[in-house]
Image (tube, rainbow, N blue to C red):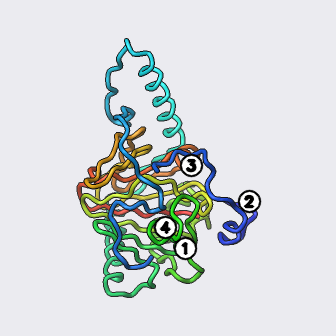
Amino acid sequence: MAGSGYTDLREKLKSMMPYRDGYKSSGGSKSRRDPAESPYGAGGGAPERKRKHHHDSDSEPTDSEDPLRGEEEEEEEEEAQKVKGGIRQLRLFSPEECVKIEARIDEVVSRAEKGLYKEHTVDRAPLRNKYFFGEGYTYGSQLQRRGPGQERLYPRGEVDTIPEWVHDLVIRKLVEHRVIPDGFVNSAVINDYQPGGCIVSHVDPIHIFERPIVSVSFFSDSALCFGCKFQFKPIRVSEPVFFLPVRRGSVTVLSGYAADEITHCIRPQDIKERRAVIILRK
C-alpha cells in the first residue's frame, strides 16, 4: 500500500522473497487450460473431513465422548473467527447499477471474441474466462516453476489499460464509500464464470499484490469458500473452514488472516448461473 516505499510493482518484486511458509496452502495467453487449475499455481490435495463453519448454516452436533474431536472443533472455530475478522462486505451496487455494469462486462467479452485485446489481456479456460487490465501476471501452467511465489508480472504494456467504465462505474463508488483510497487500484481483473466454473484454492500472490483485495460480484449470487481442499478426476471439494455468501452487487474486501493466512476458492457447486467478478488490486 501507500507508504511501502515502492513506486513500481516490478521494483517490489526484485526486493521480496517468495511467500512465507506461514499461510495455509491447499497444495495470458488465449490458450485453454484446465477449468480447475489453480490461478496461482497452488496445489490441490485430497479432501479433508467435512468442516462445519459455514457463515449461514447450523453447526453439526459434537461428540462429547471424544475429547480430541472437541479440541479439533475448537481449533476450527478459532480459525473460522480469524477468517471472519479479515472480511468486510458491503452491498453497494443497486440492481439498476448492476445492469449497467453487466452490459459493460458483456462488451469486454464481445471485444475479446473479436480479437480486439492484446494477447495477455485474455486468458480462456473451460467455464471461466479471465480478462487482465492494467497489470497482468503469469500463473498456473504459464509458470516455468510451479508453486506460490513463482508468479510474475508481465512487462508493462503487455495487457490493455483499465477501461474507463471500470473507473467511472465501479472504482469511483468504492472511493466515495472509503472502501479504498483514491489512486489505489492499478490492476483490474474480470473473471467470467459459466455454471460449474471454479478456481481452486489459492492465496493472491503476496509478493505481487498489496492488501486489501477487493472484489465486486455481478450477474448472480455465489459464495467464496476458505480452507478447502480439491481432488480431481472427478473434481471434489472438501467442506470449507468458512463459507461466505456473495450476493450480486456486493463488495467483498479481504485483508489480514483472510487474505494472507488461508486459501480461498470458488467451488463448482457454488456457480449455478453465469457469474462475473471484478477484482480490484494494487
Question: Which residue is drawn at the image coordinates 39% and 70% (left, top)?
Answer: 130
* Residue 57 sits above or below residue 268 on the image: above
Secondary structure beneath label 3? helix
Q: Nearer the viewer, mark 4 or mark 3?
A: 4
Toward the viewer: 26 or 100? 26
Give yes or no for contact between labels 3 and 2 (Cβ–Cβ under 8 Å): no
Left or right side of 176 for 95: left
Q: Where is mark 1, residue-wise?
A: 135
Q: Residue furthest right?
A: 5
Disc 4 on helix, strand or loop?
loop
Q: Residue 206 location in percent, x, y?
A: 60, 57
Residue 100 visible somewhere in the drawing? no
Spatial CA distance of label 4 from label 3 is: 18 Å
Of the residues tagged 3 and 2, which is closer to the observer? 3
How far apart, in angstroms, are the residues tagged by discs 1 and 4? 13 Å
Distance from disc 3 to disc 2, alpha carbons, whole Å, reads: 19 Å
Which residue, given by chain and number where applicable, does mark 4 sit on? 139
Q: Residue 93 location in percent, x, y?
A: 39, 57
Question: Residue placed farthest to the top in the image?
Answer: 65
Q: Which mark is residue 260?
A: 3
Q: Is residue 78 left or right of residue 200?
A: right
The amino acid type found where label 3 is placed reads Asp
Report which residue position mark 2 lands on. 3
